[in-house]
Image (spheres, coloured by chain):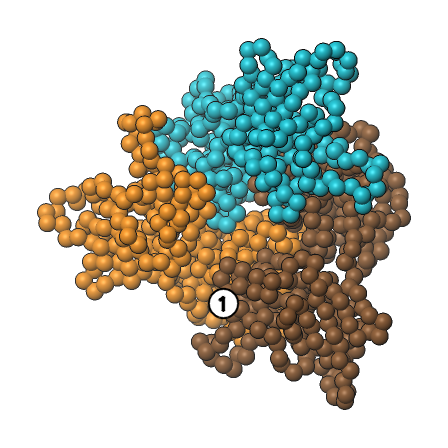
Chain colours: A orange, B brown, C cyan
Amino acid sequence: MAIITLTTDFGEKDHFAGATKGAIYSELPHVKIVDISHSVSPFNIPEAAYIIQNAYRSFPKGTIHIIGIDSEINPDNKHIALQLDDHFFICANNGIMSMICSEIAPEKIVEINIHDKIQTSFPVLDVFVKVACHIARGGTLEVIGKPINDIKPIRNVVPYINDDKTQIIGSVIYVDNYGNVITNIKRSFFESVQKGRDFEISARNHKFKKVFNKYSDIVNFDIPEDKRHDEGRGLVVFNSGNFLEIAVYKSNSNTVGSASTLMGLKLMDTVSVNFIKNTVDVYPERPLKTELKEDL
Amino acid sequence: MAIITLTTDFGEKDHFAGATKGAIYSELPHVKIVDISHSVSPFNIPEAAYIIQNAYRSFPKGTIHIIGIDSEINPDNKHIALQLDDHFFICANNGIMSMICSEIAPEKIVEINIHDKIQTSFPVLDVFVKVACHIARGGTLEVIGKPINDIKPIRNVVPYINDDKTQIIGSVIYVDNYGNVITNIKRSFFESVQKGRDFEISARNHKFKKVFNKYSDIVNFDIPEDKRHDEGRGLVVFNSGNFLEIAVYKSNSNTVGSASTLMGLKLMDTVSVNFIKNTVDVYPERPLKTELKEDL
Amino acid sequence: MAIITLTTDFGEKDHFAGATKGAIYSELPHVKIVDISHSVSPFNIPEAAYIIQNAYRSFPKGTIHIIGIDSEINPDNKHIALQLDDHFFICANNGIMSMICSEIAPEKIVEINIHDKIQTSFPVLDVFVKVACHIARGGTLEVIGKPINDIKPIRNVVPYINDDKTQIIGSVIYVDNYGNVITNIKRSFFESVQKGRDFEISARNHKFKKVFNKYSDIVNFDIPEDKRHDEGRGLVVFNSGNFLEIAVYKSNSNTVGSASTLMGLKLMDTVSVNFIKNTVDVYPERPLKTELKEDL
């Protein structure tokens, strides 16, 4: 039984997501449909790219992912289907897949060419569902499209690094439900540049010298619970997707505040990492932990 | 395997939708439940009517639609079940179904009369689920209700047209996730009045002389992409449900703006179409396209 | 076929809920997954406790409930699994279960101890899913944890009652999608203290002398519909979960207003009930209905 996932900017209120599911069940009564998100900001391609990249891997091989963001077909915006990491993705060729593809090469890409048979002002319903059901029935991509080699890129997928490798300049690519601020700096990239050096992370006027592995690593559990004041403190972690994230402990934008509200960080803002040549290479065993002097 | 859909104003946070699904699975472990929307504005019947009308058609024949808006039973608000277009609908008799029924006559309507057995302050859970499961098991409507002939209407379902058929006066019935503004003027009605004439659509102080078939028809793709300034431009389309919609290209209320935010259009606002007697009937082949002079 | 439900503060936008579902289907392709809520306010344990308590009972016996709120493991926050009322619950030991446990004693509680095998910064995905799938396959709690006797309590689960039993002092534990304000005063507790006496309920400067069984009991249906002015009137009901709730008839925070917006009531605010010794015990047959003098 195939799984079809949906990632769209349809929102939670309108009929679009419901209608799409109805169309899928009309073709394939036994498929499983899973909502990944319908709350991507309208036409926000980097957000959709971040969400699908972090969600798809948990699904079984063979899962079919429909991504409905800015999917109206026109001369600049063709429809594509990809096979990548043994998953299938159906979307517009507008950059959504470039974040995943920068890490894993697609096994196959086709430009969908079944539009001569379909007049549509609702391409997710009329085109993407058709393609998804075709794949779910075991059909090949070549039947619904012509092979192409490249997809359209988006900017800011990869952080900038200076020539003498003392600085990474990244940017904020996502702000999550907790107001935590996620950068495009991945753990593997960070560590490959760091090579054991101390560092300072700067986001606006906030500085951090340590990256934690989980949020509560900021807490000193030797202090009794009622004497601690950790809620609302800023910290940096590698999050569960291995992205460098500027966070606030027990963050809530409406109560204690969040990295987004307290530090004023927003999409596309710059986050930089400056590496410091260690005078004595004395901490080779602690690549990420230096003296504890977090900001806030 | 039957499908039961849910359209409610329960919101995304409360336990109501989850509890309803639990009650359905308790009766019918193998049914499919599909959320259409739980974000209808509280007690907003026209919104619910628009959503269910546009969603239901994508589902297979025989699908059972629970609509939980203003469903507390009282002397003025009875519960009904309808068979229409080979689908089943269960809701309060408060006008929700009058938009669909204005286009397609119901095959059967019953007023649900199983309440003597059910004490409830949660009618969707206690009554509508019972009725839905009864239908899903193949039961007839007559067993759970007594046949009636009419349902309660809502206002503003059908636009007004003047006597000499030179003007349609419609109203805004829905504002979607993109801030696009949807009127009660359907394509078939518009075209039956238009009869090839030129026209001017007015919404507040904005005027439009053309209706597009899709959003990106406003773009001139001969201009290089970096020289175009189409995002945020206003336009009129017949949307995927064939309603006349005042839209903004790549609309996002939080960034480029939307028809709702930029033009100040909201629910129940008037949108009028004035038809112009063509001096020479020169464009019979282009019923919807006149000279390009869209507003904004 | 087992059912696994999800109640989290992941929000509607992020990939967390989708990824969790993918991980479940990767282990158990035939399980049913039901979203109860992903819109619990971040780290808000009383909200989650209220939602799961009111939702779980509708599900079939044997259902497995994952509750992902403040679930990062640390010395003060262990993971637990409970069997209670023939349902299974998996969560952090942070008080979420104490509201349900104050009414129904758990059949079994274990502290989950499979973390030696799992490095995680996403415990719902990595730990709770593993435990849920273990239970869904028929595994016992003892295999994934060590039995414990107590769980961590939360405050404000039970209202205060004075020594001579003339006053209940409760507090607001939840504000629902309609802006209705729910207290921790349950019907059975209220009636056991009331013993037929008249009473006055106070919330800020608003007073109520009656508790209704449903919202539209406030309406006098003998008055013609167009002469009634009930929308926006305040009232008190025992809601579908049998909690004392301060409500507004046909409430909508954005239009007619809600108990929350009109009366300024919010989480943790005090709601008190003062019982009045009846001079003549003349209404023994009407335990909840006294003279009609509701506020607003």
Residue C276 at x, y = what percent?
Answer: 66, 16
Q: Identify whether A74 is placed above or below C136.
A: below
Secondary structure of the residue carrying numbered label 1: loop
Residue at x 77% of width, y 13% of height: C282
Q: Chain of mark 1?
A: A
Q: Is residue A64 visible?
A: no
Give the position of the C terminus of chain A as an image quadrant: top left
Question: In the image, is residue A125 above or below residue C134?
Answer: below
- Of residue C153 and residue C243, the one placed in the foreground of this image is C243
Of residues A31 and A139, which is closer to you in this image?
A: A31
Q: Is residue A18 above or below residue A91?
A: above
Q: Identify residue for label 1.
A: A93
Seen as rendered, the residue at the extreme left is A280
Q: Position of residue A96 (x, y in %)?
A: 46, 62
Q: Amino acid at mark 1?
A: Asn
Q: In the rendering, at what x and y percent does residue A21 appear?
A: 63, 53
* Label 1 Cα neighbours within 10 Å, binned few <14 / some 14-19 / many ≥20: many
Number of callouts:
1
Q: Do we see residue B265 in this rendering? A: yes
Residue at 76% in and 19% down? C286
Side of C122 where B281 appears, left or right: right
Instruction: Identify the residue at horizontal 44%, vertical 76% (top origin).
Output: B226
x then y, percent, for residue B122: 70, 34
- Residue A211, by quadrant, is top left
Identify which residue, A22 or A3, lies in the foreground. Answer: A22
Query: Residue shown at 54%/35% (left/top)?
Result: C266
> Of residues A56 and C167, which is closer to you in this image?
C167
